[in-house]
Structure formats: structure tokens, C-alpha cells
Image (tube, rainbow, N blue to C red):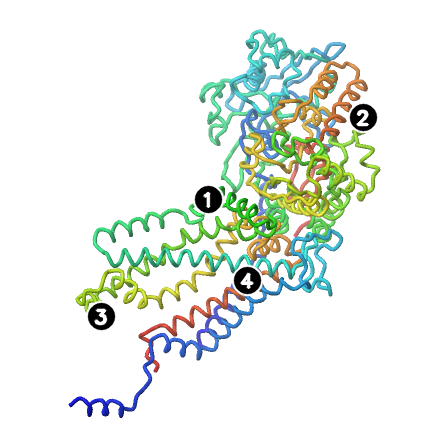
Amino acid sequence: MDEPTITCMSKVNYIAGKSLWQDAMQRLLRNRAAMLALVFLLLMAAACFLLPLFSFIPNPNLTDLDHIAAGSSADHLLGTDHLGRDMLARVLYGGRISLLVGVAATSVAFVLGLVYGLISGYVGGRTDAVMMRLVDVLFALPFIVLVIVFSLSIEEPCRELTDRVVNATGWTREAVAPILGLMPLFLAIGALGWLTLARIVRTQTLVIREQEYVQAARSLGLGHLSILFRHIAPNLLGTVIIYTTLAVPGIMLTESTLSFIGLGVKAPNSSWGTLIKEGADRMEVAPELLIYPSLFFCLTLLALNFLGDGLRDALDPKDARD
Amino acid sequence: MTRVSISLLLCCCVGGIFLFVGCGEKGESSSSRAAREGVLLIGNNSEPQSLDPHKATAVADGKIISALLEGLVRPDGQDSSVVHPGAASSWEHNADATVWTFHLREASWSDGEPVTSGDFAYAYRRLLHPEFGGRYAEMLFPLKDARGYHDGKIVWEQVRGVRTPDEHTLELQFETPMPGLLSRLLHFTWFPLPRHHVEANGGMLDRRSEWTRPGNWVGNGAYLLKERRINDYLSVEPNPLYWRATEVRNRGIRFLPIVNGYTETRMYFGGKLHITNNVPPEMIDYARHRAPGEFCRDAYYCTVFYRLNTLRKPLGDPRVRRALSLAVDRGALVQRVVRGAGREAYGFTPPTVDYPGVVDAAVKDMTQEEREQKARELLEQAGFPRGRGFPPVQIMTTSRDVQRVMAESIQAMWREVLGIQVEIRACEWTAYKAALQNGEYDISSCSWSGDFLDPATFVELWRSGAGNNCTGWGNAECDAELDAAERCADQTERLKHLAMAEAIVLRESPIIPLYWSERTYLRSPRVNGWHPLLLDNHPLDAIELDEEGGKP
């Protein structure tokens, strides 16, 4: 009795199953603007992180007071800044920090927002109310002020960490400072940038937990954690990814604001934000000091936005083009 | 694809609107409107800390206070060494200039109360009061017994320095001859206070008194406090009860606190200011080129220097301090960073005719390579060969553009010459001021401008424990020279003692003199009656605004 059925099954013209993710991937690959943006971002990251390893990029902090704001030459492809430092090197090193802050702070915000929103939305009831009111309270406080207070309060522990790393590894302070010195910034922006994400995740969770497949999973006796991370999280990941991509530019902007106040990147190191600030001051005298970093910054932000747009189109399950 | 074209279209629209608005702005600029109304718009660096002359220490505060209050004498518009009768109509002094008698004129406060000698005595008592904690109290220390009162050793009634024989006579007695007293009296620490008003608003020792609030202000100066908007402007209007009210040449002043010199210069060219406070070095060529007749570059009695906190390691070691000083290439700093708007300083007090200044001759005659060599040797002797093991120190600066650029270039010099790493901490002005006064810094970027035309205004800073010393450094020998100078009747002898004190300061290097600055600013051709002044204490009531001016 069994055998014919099996033969029958094997005869069915079998179409390979396509998951939502594969669909999305295909749609993304077809979106030319998004792909271009992605390639651009990869190239930019490669340039910022790999190019300075070659020796033809000079030390970005080496001043040369005899060649101030000089135009481009064989030694300095993009010219020099107001203290005779190589502009290309500064833009690349600045990009490292800006991209790093963008990615690191967003990751912190991503994890916090996802977990908080999931719990709030899934548990519901009074817990949800309390958790969301807390978010409301934090929302009501000015973001920048909170970030400043928070980053100042964790500055000292971070400094101690730097000292410990320097002592333990024997690296020079100069090499460690640009990254470890930014720890308060990553943490502060990330730790306070999750609010919107938490709200989005919570709303999505509220919808998804009432879906039949979640109820089915529950009736099958699956644990809460499994339901959360096997059934709910993957289904709202699309929204979260889109939001995150679109949040990176905002976070990079916050970083530049903070660097301007003196809480972010410390001189002589630079980020794109500080470079633009320095350039903006001197725009009548040496416009290229403003143009180069702005160009890099704007193109990166634009690419991030295009990529985010593309991801949204790709991950939208209701978009039934195929 | 459509989304892209829509966003491009939007960009064009926004750009077009900006262009349109830009072209449409052919109307009257705020500076020409203000000129028509007779109101002077002047850039004033930072938001004033306080308008109470006993709490203020910054230059920006002093400029506003000098418009609102009048001392015994008032400044001349063309020469910093000349004074005119102010609240005092005449004065005389005894043969050795130790006792000065001032005869006050019939004048009144802006609320109609008469200005009396008691108001001056009240003000001096308040600034010197042991419980008031006035930062600038040492300005009054030459008064007989003033220091004893300030230290709480005697009561005010025992102080012989200030006496008021009657309502219109003020007698000041000094420990030592004070031939140059009149120039000192221009400083706001010597101004009177409306005693009745201060008493009605919390009394003498109330540091939170609101007697300086707009609407609650009482003064005897050419102007009255009209309106204050934090971080926007502070405006004053002529005081109708001022005794020279008819000679006030304009109808008000607006002080704009603009810290960023680039912004300020841009606002000037945008028609929002008549006089700016400062053109940043990098903008000098641009400003000179764009407005040849409006760019001003005046001599100024001012030194730019670094304070070193000698209470912190490793700056307690004079060899380290000296090495740091020697490693700074002042020539490059003045040429490239300050763009020539100053002179390399190898001493602290800016040289004047009577006081050629003390320079570290040995250092001055060395080439920069020799200095750097010497600096490395000193640092090695101090136990940091090639900067190894040098603890992390910070340079604290204000957020001011020049200071930040300077700090970055000095940071690079120290790194390249001495191999040491320093951090830069840029603070907002009030935070900077507080950290400096509480000694919460390693190295701080400072400038000091003379309060009166005498080297004492510079050298006296370095007396041990002086209110504006802030380095924790003190030296008995140096104090003895300063005391000797104070007791000297003979001017040349006195200057010699001051020079010896300064030589000790330079040898011990609690400070790193960098350059003697000049004042670079922009002034509209509409402004009449403004002349270069070494002390930058312009009598603003003498400024007349030309409606036409040379500007469109």
C-alpha cells in the first residue's frame, strides 16, 4: 500500500522550495541602485580600513607647518589641511572612525532594542505597559544631553581600560587611543539609540504573536524562548534590518555632533564629522577642506539610504511582484 | 528609478529656493538698520560670566561693565595712557603719591540716588571682604591695610586705605607710592556700586544677588542695561541721568557673544555686526583682501601662554617644564599658525618703552635645533629619555578656534621633538574657567591682557597664591622681589625688581610664553571715533554711527 504513494511522490515535478530570504536576496540583487550602493559601501570600507596599511598614505597626524592648506600634489593627493596634514590620510582615518562608530553603536542599539521590544511585546500586559512607559520617559529627555551625561559617566572606566590594555599588550597609547577612546561614545549612543527600535519591534511582536503559526507553536508546547527566537524574531527581522540601515546615518551624525562638543573623537584624531566642522570654518579660505570630507560623508550616507530602501523593497513580504 | 528622479527634482527645488532667498536678500542688512537707529553692534567673544564687577574676571564682561558703570576716571578714546575725569571731577595727591584725594562730582545713579564716596568705599569693602571671595581682590591690595582686611586679620574700620571725609570726597591711601594709579582706576575693580540697591537685593555678601538683572539694574555709567538674551545678545541704552548724557554719541549698543571667530567674520560680511572681536589667523588674508579698509590690526598689551599645573606630576619638575617650553617652535607658531599677528615671546610681559621686558637671552639666541636638543637632554635628566614613561597629560583649551589649532600644533611639536603624547581637552568657556581656577588641569592654554599700563599687571600674577596664578607655583624669592617692587618709590628701581621677579618666573617656567598677540578685527566704515588702543578699553559712548558709511 505504501509503495505506490512513494513512486507517485517522486514523479511530481519538484520545484525547489524558496524561502522568504532567498526571495528577498533575489529581489535585492535585481535592484540596481541598492547593489550599486552596497558595492560602494564595501569599497569605501575597504579603502578606509585597508588603504592606510600601505606606506604611500602618510601619517594623518604628522603636521608640516611649511605646507599649510596646500593643493593636491604628488605627495598629497588631496592636498593638506590647515596644519599641513595629509588630507587623504585624514579622510581615510576619519572614515574608519565614522564607519566604526556607525556600525558599533548601531549594533549595540540593535541588540538592546530587539531584546527589549521582543520581551515587552511578547509578555504584554502590565510588563509591557511599564517597559513602554520607561521608553516614553527616555524619549521625553533630550537625546544629546542624555548621551553626554552617560558618556561622561563611563569615561573614567574606559580610560582605566585603555591603561590596562596598554600595560598588558605593550602597544603604544597612540595606536590604541583612537579606538578605545571612542568606547564611551559607542556605548552611549548605542545604549540610548535603541528606543525607536524597541517600539517598532514591540508593535511587530504584538501582531505576530497573534498569528496562527505562533498559536500553533504554543499549542504544541514550545517554550517561550523558542517561540520568541524561532518564530517571532525571524519574522520581524526584515523590518529591523531596514530600520537599522536607515539609522546608521543618524548615528554617524550624532557622533559628529558629539565630536564637535569635544566628547567624541579627541584631537588630533578625526572623524568625518570633525573634518567637516574644521572645513566649514575655513570654507572661504580653503574650500577643499570642506568639500572632500563632505563628499565622502554624503556619498556614504546616500549609499546607506539606497541600501536601506532596497532592503525594504526586498524584505517586504507583501510585495508580491513574483 | 522614479524614486530617484523624484528625489533629484526635490533637491533642485530646495536648491532653487535657497538661491531665490539668497538673491532676494537685497533688502536692508541689520547693520545698516542698526546704524540708522544709532545702535552699535559689537562682537563680544563670550557670554559674560557676570555683570557684577566683583564676580567678573573675563575681558568680555569688563567691556560691558565699563559701559554700565563709571569709575573715578574714564578712558581716553585715542591713547590708553591718558585718562579723563569720570565720577571724580578733580583729584590731587601728596608729594610721594601715597595719598590721593578725589573730589566727586554731583552725579546720580540711574534711579536718582546721588553717587557718594560711600558707594566707592562700599564697593572696595565688598571686593576685599574675607567672606566674599573676590577673584580680583588683589587689584586693591596696594591700598593700605587692604591685605590685612582680606586675610581677616583686621576689621574694616581699621583699614586706613579708604576714607570718606564727606559725601563727595574719597581719600585713598597706599602702602607705597602709586604714581601710575590713574591708569589702574580704569579697571572695573575700582568702580563704585549702588550701595542702596545692592543692600536692597540681598546685601553685600549675597553672591546670588539679582541686582544686575535687566529691569533691576542700577548704574552710574553712560548706559543702562536694557535686555539680555542668553547666547543671543545683551543690549544697553543711554542712561538719561548720566552726567555727560548729552555727549553720548550713539543710541545704544548690542553686545553679541560669538565665540567662533569664523562665524563672527562671516556675520560681519553678512551685515550683522559693526565691529568684530577677532578675525582668526587663517581668515586674515581673506578679510584683508575682501575689505582692505575695514580690516584692523592693532598692537595689544597681551600675552598668549600656557599655564602648567605644577602640583601635578610630572609638571612639578622644573626640568620637564623647561623642556616643554624649549620644544615649542615659536617661530613656526607665529609665522604659520598665528599668521604673523603677533611676536614670538621668550618672556612673559610684552615689552614696552619703559620696560623692555625680560627675555631668556640664552634661549632666544639659540637656534630651534639647539633648543630642541637641549629640551631632549632636560627631559632625559628628568627621567624620561625620548619621552619613555612620560605619564599622559592633557592640554586644556577653550573651544576657541585659534587655541585649538595652536594646541594641535604644539601637541605635534612635543610628539615629534620629545616623543611624548598629550591629549587635548576643549572646554566650553565657563567650564574652562572653573577648571582653571580650581586647578583641575595639567596644561592650560591661556592669554592675559594687561588691566593697566604697567608690567605689574603681568608679573604680579605669579605671586604665590595670587587669585589668577592658578598654577600652584610660588617662589619666596620671586615674592620678595615683588614686595620690593611694591615698596619702591623710584620707578626705574621698581621696574628692575619686577624684571628680577619675572626672570625667576622664566627660569622656573610654571608657564610657557608663546607669543605677544595683536588684535585683528573688522570695523565697518560707518563707525566713527574708534582708535587703536593698547589696552582695548574703548569708551563706547564716543562712537558715532554714520548712516551712509562706505558700505552698500
Check disc 4 and report the residue beneath it: A297
Above or below, A261 against B451 in this view is below
Decide which of tag 1 and tag 3 comes sooner along the chain: 1
Chain on which label 4 sits: A
Q: Quadrant of residue B243?
A: top right
Q: Residue at x 80, y 21 (%)?
A: B496
Identify the mark at residue B354; answer none if there is no mark.
2
Both labels 3 and 4 in a single chain: yes
Q: Nearer the viewer, residue B274 or B330?
A: B330
Residue type, label 1: Ile
Task: Locate residue B424, reporting x and y percent.
Answer: 60, 44
Q: Quadrant of residue B42?
A: top right
What whole-number distance in Å separates the C-alpha atoms at marks 2 and 4? 56 Å
Q: Nearer the viewer, residue B204 or A195?
A: A195
Q: Residue at x 56, y 59 (%)?
A: A96
Residues tagged 3 and 4 counted as in contact (Cβ below 8 A): no
Q: Quadrant of residue B423?
A: top right
Residue type, label 4: Phe
Residue type, label 3: Tyr
Residues tagged 1 and 4 counted as in contact (Cβ below 8 A): no
The reply to whether residue B522 is visible in this rendering is: no
Check disc 1 and report the residue beneath it: A154
Both labels 2 and 4 in a single chain: no
